[in-house]
Image: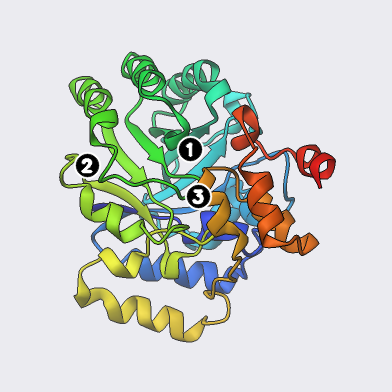
Amino acid sequence: MQIIDVTLRDGGHVRDFNWPIRFAQKHYLSLSKIPEIKFIELGYWKQTSKSKNTFYNLDFKKVKKITQEKKLKNVSIMIDYHYCSKDLSDYPNNKQKEIAMIRVCSRKEDIPKALKFAENLKKQTRLNVSFNIFNSTNYKKNELLKVCKMVAKHKIDYVYFADTHGDMDLEKLYKKFKKPLSILNKSGKKIGMHLHDHSGKGYFNFRQLKKYNIDKCDSSIRGMGKGFGNLRTEQIVNPKYFNIIGSLVKEFNDLLTMPQNIYTLITSKYGISDNYATLGKKTKMPIVKFNKLCSRVKGKDKDNFNNKFFKKKY
């Protein structure tokens, strides 16, 4: 299995993208010693919303500080097409020796433009480029097939399906994914999964990947990530490297502890943004009332948090 560790990037949602640099440096150097971890995703590159902190607004100077200029060429960075710079000159190219992968995350409504942008990014940077399909479980069978046909026609390297809201059950989705995956495989795309653990199925879904002929996935230390977190890196790497992860957790235990939010179990049930869970917890909304409101979230509001929806209803 080829792993992208997303502790710093996805776990940034838990720490407001404000990791101590000393921790980030040690995390990067430690996990670089584990062969199964092909890339280490440090954060988002020069985004324009949500947070002004380091790991949501990476640039090359910050990357070099984290990697200490080891030139291992195993860094991945992510951009959310919805919020990223559309100026291709803002991105690193293949001449530098740290960054190897740029991942473009796209919402359903942005797919055509985001795909074209990802292809142009590949031409401009000559780095590995991945197209990450945000909340793939909210696609109907025909929609997923249509998107994968589009992806197959574009010159990019990787395609990742994201279980963004943690409601994926790969045991039940084989028929939905079979044809789209076949099309992507024929086009030469490398395929991976980003698995969340909101409903406790992160590792269960990981065990299904062999049936799907997928050998690439994301994970994070202790599942650090949005909502109830991700598939855990320590669950899937070779046990002989447990000492590396254990030493990291022992030294930085407080940083690597996931806060729990019971409301996330409900948002994952309906496949909606866990930002609704954050609001539910913040307002101390009664669970029964929260469940009822979540059941009414439809369409774009499932993926794109609509604060007005809950304010109007509650």
Gap between marks 1 and 3, in whole Å?
13 Å
Q: Earlier in the sequence, mark 3 or mark 2?
A: 2
Q: Quadrant of residue 185?
A: top left
Q: Position of residue 116 (x, y in %)?
A: 48, 16
Q: Position of residue 300 (x, y in %)?
A: 62, 28
Judging by the rendered image, the residue that carries numbered circle 2 is 214
Q: Could you tell me the amino acid type at mark 2?
A: Ile
Q: Residue at x 44, y 80 (%)?
A: 249
Q: Is residue 7 above or below residue 134?
A: below
Judging by the rendered image, the residue that carries numbered circle 1 is 135
Gap between marks 2 and 1, in whole Å?
18 Å
Q: Residue at x 23, y 30 (%)?
A: 175
Could you tell whether 179 is left or right of 273 in the image?
A: left
Q: Position of residue 108 (x, y in %)?
A: 53, 25
Q: Could you tell me the amino acid type at mark 1?
A: Asn
The local secondary structure at tag 3 comes to helix
Q: Earlier in the sequence, mark 2 or mark 1?
A: 1
Judging by the rendered image, the residue that carries numbered circle 3 is 269
Q: Is residue 183 above or below residue 190?
A: above
**Viewer-proximal residue among 272 and 196:** 272
